[in-house]
């Protein structure tokens, strides 16, 4: 892995329904790659920006070899904010100093338009997710569904299962 997350939070637990829930223990410092643990409030990350075979200079306070940043509980919101407020303005400036190689002006314009569209759609999608969707457990047990051959009658008797 080329990245590490640090966060201070209560550990997760798994309940009787195999759902991940808030654990009752004291908060602790967690060091992770972010693949198993969820971020519940705030995290900082370090991102190695060089190949694994190249050492990171430890006598340099800050350079492009090791990047640092923070992520809030909603990583998609953080990504949208960073893209829209940091990278999009930086990349879109003609005097940005970006080396485009053999790209012509049409290819650059297509990139800018695609980047702006992606950033806008991400922002709209994150906004749509803001309210969240709450799914409630079905009152009818699975055993009742399996033992009945006539599902139409079951739905008539218990319309809340639909």
Image: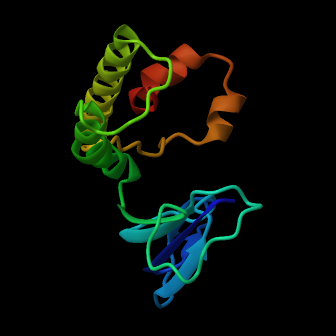
Q: Of all residues shown, which one is farthest toward the right?
A: 53
Going by the image, does 130 lie left or right of 28? left
Q: Of all residues shown, which one is farthest toward the top?
A: 106
Q: Return the x and y of residue 20 as percentages of the image width and height.
A: 55, 63
The residue lying at 68 percent from left, 19 percent from top is: 149
The residue lying at 30 percent from left, 32 percent from top is: 119
Q: Return the x and y of residue 55 as percentages of the image width and height.
A: 69, 70
Foreground of the two, 25 or 117: 117
Height in image: 25 above or below 21? Answer: below
Which quadrant of the figure has residue 4? Answer: bottom right
Height in image: 99 above or below 34? Answer: above
Q: Of all residues shown, which one is farthest toward the bottom?
A: 26
Foreground of the two, 27 or 20: 27
The residue lying at 64 percent from left, 39 percent from top is: 142
Count the numbered circles shown: 0
Image quarter hosting the N terminus = bottom right
Q: Return the x and y of residue 46 as percentages of the image width and height.
A: 52, 68
Q: Return the x and y of residue 10 as percentages of the image width and height.
A: 47, 81
Image quarter hosting the C terminus = top left
Going by the image, does 65 lie left or right of 117? right
Foreground of the two, 29 or 94: 94
Going by the image, does 18 lie left or right of 66? right
The residue lying at 46 percent from left, 76 percent from top is: 7
Which quadrant of the figure has residue 127? Answer: top left
Q: What colouring does the structure picture have? A: rainbow
């Amino acid at each position: 892995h080329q990245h590490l997350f640090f966060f201070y939070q209560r550990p997760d637990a798994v309940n009787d329904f195999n759902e991940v829930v808030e654990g009752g223990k004291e908060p602790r410092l967690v060091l992770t790659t972010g693949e198993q643990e969820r971020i519940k409030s705030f995290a900082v990350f370090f991102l190695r920006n060089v190949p694994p075979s190249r050492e990171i200079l430890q006598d340099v306070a800050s350079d492009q070899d090791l990047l640092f940043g923070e992520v809030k509980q909603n990583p998609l919101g953080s990504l949208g904010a960073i893209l829209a407020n940091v990278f999009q303005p930086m990349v879109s400036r003609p005097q940005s100093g970006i080396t485009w190689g053999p790209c012509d002006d049409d290819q650059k314009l297509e990139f800018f338009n695609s980047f702006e569209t992606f950033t806008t759609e991400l922002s709209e999608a994150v906004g749509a997710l803001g309210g969240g969707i709450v799914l409630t457990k079905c009152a009818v047990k699975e055993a009742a569904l399996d033992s009945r051959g006539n599902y139409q009658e079951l739905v008539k008797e218990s319309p809340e299962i639909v």
